[in-house]
Amino acid sequence: MEQLEDSPPRRSGQQLREWVQEFRDQGHLFAGTLKVIDQEDADSQDTGLVVMRLMNAKASIYMQPKGYDEPLWEATLTGRPEELTLSPHDMASLAAELVVAGNLCSFLQWKSLEWDRESGTHKE
């Protein structure tokens, strides 16, 4: 059972790319870049990792399920080595990017729950 604890629910990189594209197709705009990078879990199986690079701060946010058999997702903002000083406009722009990141993470969580509810009906 210990092996499963290190393994998040398996959402392949390809599946995540489709979900991210669906999110984009809904008209969500963001200033930075958004992509799915390849990642393997403890069993060397493809899980993918969603990464948003922020334009208004030298930082990234990565998103993934919280853990094996967990329905919730989490977003991690990478650490910054120095303080960040922003104009009011830049701060509002950064806040807008964070809102999009939160919306995307919620969307991915919803898609995962939907996928799980329909388990057994997916074609391999």
Image (cartoon, rainbow, N blue to C red):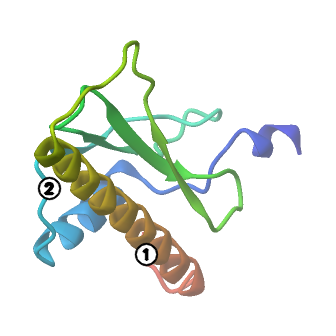
Q: Residues within 10 Å of mark 2 (few under 14, many from 20)?
A: many
Residue found at the far right of this picture? 1
Answer with left or right where residue 5 lies relative to residue 28.
right
Answer with left or right where residue 47 lies relative to residue 117.
left
Query: Quarter holding the C terminus?
Result: bottom left
Query: Quarter holding the N terminus?
Result: top right
Q: Check disc 2 and report the residue beneath it.
A: 30
Helix, strand or loop under label 2:
loop
Residue 6 to residue 34: above or below: above
Residue 25 in sight:
yes
8, 43: nearer the viewer: 8
Q: Amino acid at mark 1?
A: Lys
Q: Nearer the viewer, mark 2 or mark 1?
A: 2
Place of residue 107 in the rendered image (x, y in percent of width and height, measured from the top left):
39, 72
Q: Check disc 1 and report the residue beneath it.
A: 111
Residue found at the far front of this picture? 88
Q: Residues within 10 Å of mark 1 (few under 14, many from 20)?
A: some
Place of residue 45 in the rendered image (x, y in percent of width and height, measured from the top left):
53, 40
Answer with left or right where residue 68 lies relative to residue 106.
right
Q: Residue at x 64, y 32 (%)?
A: 42
57, 73: nearer the viewer: 57
Place of residue 2 in the rendered image (x, y in percent of width and height, measured from the top left):
87, 39
Helix, strand or loop under label 1:
helix
Residue 32 in sight:
no
63, 60: nearer the viewer: 60
Answer with left or right where residue 37 lies relative to residue 117.
left
Q: How many marks?
A: 2
Q: Quadrant of residue 86?
A: top left
